[in-house]
Image (cartoon, grey):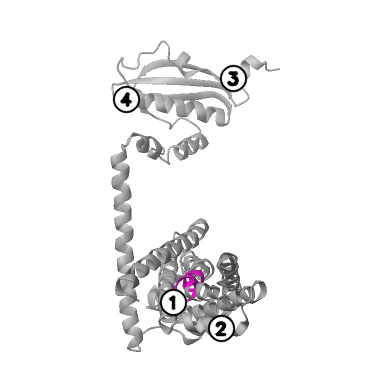
Amino acid sequence: MTSDSDNRPECSAHSSDSEGGGRVLVLRLSGRWLLSNKRPELTHVLAGIDAAAGHDSMRFDVDDLQAWDTGLLIFVRACQDWADEQGLVCHLGDLPVGVQNLVALSRAVPKDKSTPDRQLRGWLAGLGELSLGMLDGLMRFFVFTGELVLDLLAFTAGRAQIRRKDFLFILQTTGAMAVPIVSLLSFLTGLIIAFIGVIQLQKFAADIYVADLVGLAMTRELAAVMAGVIMAGRTGAAFAAQIGSMKVNEEIDALTTFGISPMQFLVLPRVIAMVLMMPLLCVCANLVSILGGMVVATAISDVSVTQYLNQIDYAVSTTDFAIGIFKSAVFGLIIAMAGCYRGLHCGKDATAVGLAATSAVVTSITWIVVADAVFAVMFHILGI
């Protein structure tokens, strides 16, 4: 019967001469090197060894090694690290082949030094990296815009690679299929504005002017903005997700291999469809929001339907309608460009697709608000 003391892992160190004349530090391993057994500490094994005393390499003697598992791998890795610190060459050739392969695999991937390095870098380096990243993104967007302009010119000349069937389907999804949600939210928006206005105007017996409030607010500003925000969350995110998924599946690379321009085949029809459909959705939002305001005005005040419509006709001019329609076309261009740009520059994993869709929505809404503010100042300067 074998006692536990005969099976426990042991290690001893001694020096020997190599064939080349140098000194070799030999670690003799014996017993069962298992995780369940208590292993000797490397510092205790090397306590009486002076690594600088002529040693130039290290090797292992495993003639008495009985069994091993991860416990031996841990010890060998510790020996390798110690040898590297002492400037010694660690030879693993005498170890079992399985140990050699696993140790080599454990050292194949370098340590991740990004976190310590990132902590050591100052805020100026981080600011510089952020600035370079923003500049790189800006240059990519300029390239994207330039390619889109050239493709639009090719489309007007009849040389664009667009499938009619796909274009008609995109028109349907961005136009007719978006009417219910745009109509619902526009109706509620007009209803809310009219309700707030009537409550305040009744104090001055000026209930009729709720038509001015709803008509001007919706036709000039809110109808286009509401439709833009809705389409940014509904269609802009869909564009980014569709194109991003195609990039993940390498379908865009396949299109390029076949000589088909992804910009013309994927981006151009979506941009044209959004620019064409957004004004129509804006008109729909105008009419439905005015209807919502009429419901409130006639329900909780003395304003009749005829009076409300006559006041709308008096207060809202064709210019007001045209301004809202023009804004909606610009907003449609912003939504389509943001969605397609984020999709084309998406990463190549599932997480990146979700991030691209989120980024498309945020970018679209942000630039819609910025563009609306610019238009407000510009129209004020022009006296429109």
Residue topped by disc 3: 38
Disc 1 vs disc 2: which is toward the camera? 2
Q: Nearer the viewer, residue 272 or 218?
A: 218
Q: Return the disc, 3 or 1, that comes first in the chain's sequence.
A: 3
User: In which image quadrant can residue 26 be found?
Assistant: top left
Sequence-wise, the earlier of marks 4 and 3 is 3
Question: Nearer the N terminus, badge 2 or badge 4?
Answer: 4
**CA distance separating discs 1 and 4:** 75 Å
* Separation of residues labelled 3 and 1 (CA atoms): 79 Å
* The C terminus - image quarter: bottom left
Towards the viewer: 227 or 72: 227
**CA neighbours of label 1 inside 10 A, class few (<14), some (14 to 19), many (20+):** many
Residue sitting at the far right: 1
Residue pictured at 32% horizontal, 88% vertical: 157
Q: Which residue is mark 2?
A: 309
Part of the protein shown in magenta: 217-228
User: Observer-nearest residue: 183 or 123?
Assistant: 183
Type of amino acid under label 4: Gly
Magenta region, mostly helix, strand or loop? helix
Which image quadrant is residue 46 in? top left
Find out whether the residues at labels 2 and 4 contact each other: C-beta distance under 8 Å. no
Q: Find disc 4 in the rendering and name its residue.
A: 87
